[in-house]
Amino acid sequence: MSQATNQSWGGRFSEPTDAFVARFTASVNFDQRLAPQDIQGSIAHATMLARVGVLTDDERDAIINGLNEIQGEIERGEFNWSVPLEDVHMNIEARLTEKIGITGKKLHTGRSRNDQVATDIRLFMRDEIDVIEVELKRLREGMIELADREAETIMPGFTHLQTAQPVTFGHHILAWQEMLARDHERLLDCRKRGNVMPLGAAALAGTTYPIDRHVTAELLGFDRPTENSLDAVSDRDFAIEFTSFASILLMHLSRMSEELVLWTSAQFNFIDLPDRFCTGSSIMPQKKNPDVPELVRGKTGRVYGHLISLLTLMKSQPLAYNKDNQEDKEPLFDAVDTVRDCLKAFADMVPAIEPKKASMYEAARRGFSTATDLADYLVRKGVAFRDAHEIVGQSVAYGLKSEKDLSEMSLDELKQFSDTIEQDVFEVLTLEGSVAARNHIGGTAPNQVRAAAQRAREALSALKAGA
């Protein structure tokens, strides 16, 4: 028997596929990862075929039992994956036919590898999104608790990486949490939009068999079957949407990583990361390198590449399915793995961050971070803002020459710039006074940080409850 007739499609061909072409076009080396979902989909398909009378109950049971045995072989590492059989689907079907005979060949009735793989990938993505969401929740929980704990820890806030105004460390961490809250919404939205079932679209036009797609969708936990068979087999929007989510998430984690790298440096000295998240130098014994955040920062570009790869893959494809779509899996699989691992690393690391409170406080004292508070004080005393701005600018210039922060100047020194300044000015020139003055929703006052942490905690609990 020729190699061609050993293939599911070999009847039309008069010569075997070239050995190199067989290897070049095969996907089994990477799509075998879809085996659990492929078997899950096949069991549901066989169940539906029996329900509509295409298979007998005995045929259905033989198929399901055979598929479950194959699943065991795969899990134990006993399954022999064959490149000539091209992909995960044909490998499993061929093994099923070996085990139960001709009944195994009936499993493919009413479907194509086109709708089969589209279903497998959606099932895979749904499973992986659920795992990723667990890690994302864990990271958000850790950030919320860290922010609550450090609601009064003062640090400098920056614009242009220049000292701007004092904030609290808890407020800064809640800014990170806000980024992740948006990412969380995007992830859940991606899951919802992707949870529709292509199976039954067959190659591109549907099938003449009396299938019931609603039954199969219910068995597989999909919200509904897809509406259009052409779109069902060729759509990869769900994969692009996931990698878009992944790119935005990694962009956020990369920004956080950059700050962690800066903060652990001797120049900032704001935080300490536990040794288990760092490595040393092979030549410089004093070094403690923040490798985890550095690596997450580096992996961000990798995920961006996967998004561009998938967008480029799909941009020129006519309807319906094309072999190009075989190239969707490797970037998607790697994006999934990268996101999951980065989230796990951060979820383990962030709650263990130890702020160096004295260093943060001293840094906030430098750079005239309460200059805006002095301007606001003058405005409240009736000085026009532009005049107040000029007065404070002169005060800062004096401070630079005398090497004194505004809070370190005497009342007489300050009054040389404006007679409006009185003794009560020192209530706003302290770091504690500056922070406490931002006492509104979204502000950095410690009581507002604690309230924001509680709201975030409640919102996350509502998500957990499925609200």
Image: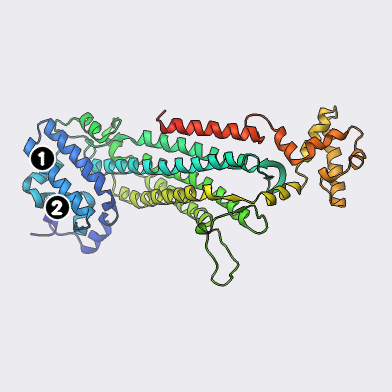
Q: Which mark is residue 341?
A: none
Q: Is residue 451 above or below residue 399?
A: above
Q: Amino acid at mark 2?
A: Arg
- Estimate the spatial distance between the alpha carbons at disc 1 and disc 2, rounded to whole Å: 16 Å
Q: Quadrant of residue 60?
A: top left
Q: Nearer the viewer, mark 1 or mark 2?
A: 1
Crowding at label 2, few (<14), some or many (≥20) Cα neighbours within 10 Å? some
Q: Position of residue 461 (x, y in %)?
A: 45, 32
Q: Please name whichever residue, 281 or 213, is drawn nearer the observer in this view of the structure.
A: 281
Q: Residue at x 52, y 63 (%)?
A: 279
Q: Amino acid at mark 1?
A: Asp
Q: Which mark is residue 61?
A: 1
Q: Is residue 308 above or below residue 387?
A: below
Q: Is residue 82 above or below residue 52?
A: below
Q: Relative to 381, is 97 on the left or the right? A: left
Task: Residue under label 2, please give it.
Answer: 95
